[in-house]
Amino acid sequence: MLKSTTTTKTVCYHCGEFCEEETILVDDKQFCCTGCKLVYEILKENNLCTYYSFEGTPGKSKKNEAIGHRYAYLDTESIAEKLIIFKNKNSTHVRFHIPKMHCSSCIWLLEHLSRLDKGVLQNQVNFIQKELFIVFDPKITSLRKLVELLDRIGYEPELNLEQIQQKIKKKKSKIRIYKIGLAGFAFGNIMLLSFPEYFSGGVYNGEDFRKIFGFLNLFLAIPVFFFSANEFMINAWKGIQQKTINIDVPIAIGIIAMFLRSSFEIISGTGAGFFDSMTGLVFFMLLGRNFQDKTYDWLSFDRDYKSYFPISVTRIKNSKSEEPVTVSDLKINDRLRIHHLEIIPADSLLVEDYASIDYSFVTGESNPVNCLKGERIYAGGKLIGSTAEVIVQREVSQSYLTQLWNRSNDKGISISYFQKISAAISKWFVIITLTIATASAIYWYSLDINKSINAFTSVLVIACACALALSAPFTFGNMLRILGKKGIYLKSAFVIERLADVHTIVFDKTGTLTESNNVAITYKGNEIPDEHLDAIESIAACSSHPLSKLLAKHLHSNKKCLKVNYILEHPGKGIEGDIKNHHYSLGSYDFIVGINHEKKDKQKHTSIFIKIDECTIGYFQFNNQYRHGLKSTIEKLQKDNYKTAIITGDHEGEKMILENIFSSTSEIKFNQSPQNKLDYIKHLQKHGDKILMVGDGLNDAGALMQSNIGLTISQDINNFSPACDGIVLNDQFNNLPALLSFAKSGIRIVIISFIISIAYNVIGLYFAIQGTLSPVIAAILMPISTSSLVLYTVIASSLKARKLGLS
């Protein structure tokens, strides 16, 4: 490898900055410092030089930086614990905020960290939030080594241990207010000093005053140019450095053109300049952006877990009483009772002697982890087996349930259809705008210099792709907010897009079509002693099945739940467990008695059979009450041309009732295991159907995940299922037709807003190229057009929601 130094001033291959002092030459590539050279060599050594093919000079300068022992404190376990969000023997999870992440090259490099550190098992980039999620093997690498690696390649994470204890909020700077004030002051005074020019038609005989007023205008314009307008210049320059043309480039060009032309006219005495237009442009552009920011803040859709993650848990008030609470109300040191298959909502300490935790939601590994008393159990884990008591150790806002939900089941979707469209249009928008502005200026230059300046600047200012880019996020964001208030919680905007594309709806029966809180339960069989009833209640409480939960509620006494020594649930069949030297089995006829078609055919009602040790003693019969308004809901769906089907694990005892509710064209399948349900969804998809699966999220989790969209109907919201794309509260089931109609309306609103945005730009450009539109008026119209379009999407979606009864 050839290395040499020279004094020629060149641009660094890595960061794009000028090599002020020396140039380091490596492989015929120039670098401004040893740090940039080192990053290049690291990337080359690991075959990661594709990094430079996405954006030219995408790196960050590493001049005058030395790592040394800066991160030695991360070796301290108590400090590292504050940054770690999950750990076990095989993996540790951390999340970093990376302020210097700025382009596609950054994303590509950060997503390939495993090639720079073999200990990195998994990593995921959130570009909008500038966050990097990493799973690493603590036996191979460490938190300190990862942070040092990120620093070496130019992506130093922001490690503020105080902020780790709370959600980081962006601080609003007051600098823009000062910029607006300065620009407004200068604009007003320049207009005042330009009155002689205005009223004389450009011919003013007081030459002395004319020169004085001209230089006063220049004096007032200079701070506006260098201070008030600097955010346009800085943003434009950053784009140019990355070899991209952002929306601030044409605005910056227009401001520079007016400032230089006006300065020349004032100094040379050949004219009055355009400082009134320039300062007015800056003033109204800043005012417009501030108005946009206020509008966006008011319509903020950056939802945290409380906005769409309606889990409730059981908090122990004292030794005898319990209460359901939402996760947002949990506090450190709260004592919780977690039931079988419930999600642990916050990092906690285990109080029980023993518990088995399934971390597949967190790590993807299905093998349960055995935890002992006093051990930390992490948010997102799922309890397997007997109920357990835990003590909350960390605020719920520190947990990452929301991130896990979004990561658990993205179904291959990485970017929405509308994002692709807006990205494709925006890519050429600025280039076309610059071309039109230049052509207009050239055309008018020989005819009227004033019109030439006006046309050039007005075209650059009034053309804006912001409205195009913001239409979909604000439409879907407002829809998510409206639905959340109604009790319909969707994972993301992608869900709305996919809901609009559905044409087949598959329902589970128990807990979905039936009323979970309005079921008559009767017992038939041998008398059961109280001690066995208490045991049956404790076993049923450990089950995730809706019928088991109804039975536990039916048998509930004020006594403390008995300790279950052994528990095993057979999905779709039943559950068994040991309490005080007795073995209890609860489940279907086939599971408890065995297959006997002659007797089974006589069972016309849903039942849970009971076996104690080896003796079947009887069964609890459930007289299902179907949801009020179910028939009309299904008729609405079928009227809207949706195909419907039912898959249930129950027997055919209620077949005639279901056939009366659903049409003859609806397929109804009984005695379906969880695997049968999954296979049925796959079968429909093979024939081109786009499936919406509606279930309870427990025995149909596989079908929910396989379907194009999976919605969970939640009664007590303790049973959150990571497999679902949305949670629908129990009383909102009959709004399913309205939800699907709302999703289709959202697509139409976005398309209309796209058309309006394009029309805005065409009409604005029509007047701008004629040179009759003042840059100041253009500066006023541009943010108004953007904000009005955003408000249109919000108002239109809100009105549609009201019409459908969703608000």
Image (cartoon, rainbow, N blue to C red):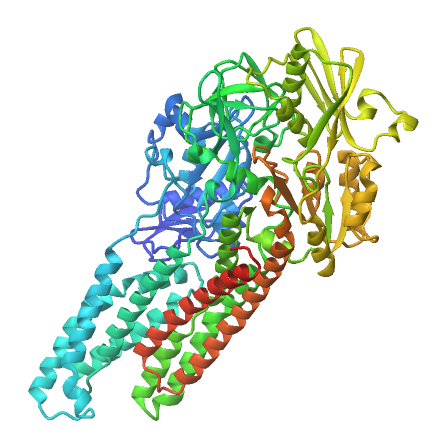
**Relative to residue 199, is residue 568 depicted above or below?**
above
Residue extending farthest right: 598
In this view, the residue in front, 83 or 3, is 83
Residue 254 horizontal/vertical position (percent): 33, 74
Q: Quadrant of residue 607?
A: top right
In which quarter of the view is residue 237 placed? bottom left
Query: Is residue 245 toward the left or the right of residue 719 in the image?
Result: left
What residue is drawn where x is 63% and y is 41%? 713
Which of the pair 137/502 is nearer the observer? 502
Give left or right: position of 153 versus 539: left
- Relative image position of residue 259 (x, y in whole percent): 25, 75
Q: Is residue 116 visible?
A: no
When the figure is inspected, residue 132 is found, relative to residue 595, above or below; the finding is below
Along the line of sight, which residue is nearer the eye, 554 or 361? 554
**Depth order, front residue of 597/628:** 628
Residue at 39% over, 53% down: 12
For the point 88% across and 25% down, the residue is 595
Residue at 64% across, 12% down:
565
Residue extending furthest toward the top? 581
| Residue 586: percent from left, percent from top | 73, 21
Whether residue 732 is visible here, answered yes or no, is yes
